[in-house]
């Protein structure tokens, strides 16, 4: 049974400024405060699970228990079938300690080239986990399919956006208007399921 969110504050369990902007924008019309783990000076928990849903729940749980407030975590990444699903849950780690996504995109492209590069299909996956301090939690997935291009194009978005074109579109997520990307993306699709279950 889904639980309705009735608190006056939701803490986003993320230190990623791009994700925080996107998620906060999705909650603009609601009458509760949206804060972040960074505002509470919480450390980022080590992501030790082997799936998007496992890591999302882990992060949301750590934040909810540390703050005593319901927490929402996002675990998302780029999945490339030709690379056996990599970078997947390791999408941020491919960017190294300095979060260098130029480096990460080059790694994806060179890895694809090593496979012969014929299959450039990919998708972004997002899992949103909502966790209450009493242990109740919910998780919702969203996905958008597309393909990868090289060289990267555009300076909008973040992460792997400049090399990803969603199916049915011509612009990369890096070239697309941020609001349009927000409207069609994997995070919006997961968010729609979350809202329907817990915020409607």
Image (cartoon, helix red, strand yellow):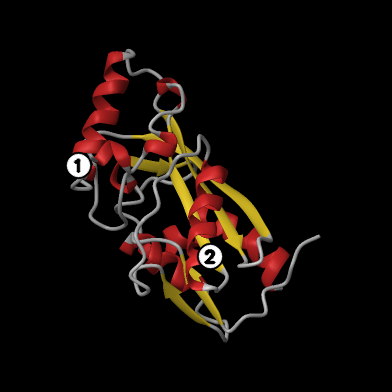
Nearer mark to the viewer, of 2 and 1: 2
The residue sitting at 37% across, 73% down in the picture is 40
- Residue 177 in percent (x, y) is at 35, 62
Residue 77 lies left or right of residue 61; in this view the side is: left
Q: Quadrant of residue 92?
A: top left
**10 Å crowding of disc 1: few (<14), some (14-19), many (20+):** few
Q: Quadrant of residue 131?
A: bottom right
Residue 137 lies left or right of residue 57; in this view the side is: right
The residue sitting at 62% across, 62% down in the picture is 192
The answer to whether 169 is drawn above or below residue 135 in the figure is above
Q: Residue furthest right?
A: 1
The answer to whether 19 is drawn above or below residue 36 in the figure is above
Residue 175 lies left or right of residue 100; in this view the side is: right
State the quadrant of the N terminus: bottom right
Residue 142 lies left or right of residue 174; in this view the side is: right
The residue sitting at 50% across, 79% down in the picture is 28
- Residue 54 in percent (x, y) is at 55, 43
The residue under label 2 is 65
Front position in the image: 170 or 130: 130
- Residue 194 in percent (x, y) is at 64, 62
User: Residue 156 shows which numbered tag?
Assistant: none
User: Residue 102 shows which numbered tag?
Assistant: 1
Q: CA distance from mark 2 to mark 1?
A: 35 Å
**10 Å crowding of disc 2: few (<14), some (14-19), many (20+):** some
Front position in the image: 47 or 52: 47
Tell which circle, 2 or 1, labels the residue nearer the N-terminal end.
Answer: 2
SS class, disc 1: helix
């Amino acid at each position: 049974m889904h639980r309705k969110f009735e608190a006056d504050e939701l803490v986003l369990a993320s230190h990623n400024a791009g994700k925080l902007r996107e998620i906060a924008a999705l909650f603009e019309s609601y009458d509760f405060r949206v804060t972040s783990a960074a505002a509470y000076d919480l450390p980022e928990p080590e992501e030790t699970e082997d799936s998007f849903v496992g890591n999302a729940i882990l992060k949301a749980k750590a934040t909810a228990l540390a703050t005593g407030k319901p927490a929402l975590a996002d675990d998302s990444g780029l999945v490339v079938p030709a690379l056996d699903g990599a970078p997947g849950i390791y999408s941020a780690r491919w960017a190294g300690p300095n979060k260098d996504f130029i480096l990460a995109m080059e790694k994806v492209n060179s890895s694809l080239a090593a496979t012969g590069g014929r299959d450039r299909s990919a998708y972004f996956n997002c899992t949103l986990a909502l966790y209450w301090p009493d242990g109740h939690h919910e998780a919702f997935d969203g996905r958008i399919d597309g393909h990868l291009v090289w060289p990267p194009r555009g300076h909008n978005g973040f992460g792997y956006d400049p090399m990803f074109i969603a199916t049915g579109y011509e612009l990369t997520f890096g070239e697309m208007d941020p609001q349009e990307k927000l409207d069609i993306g994997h995070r919006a699709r997961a968010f729609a399921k979350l809202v329907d279950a817990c915020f409607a």
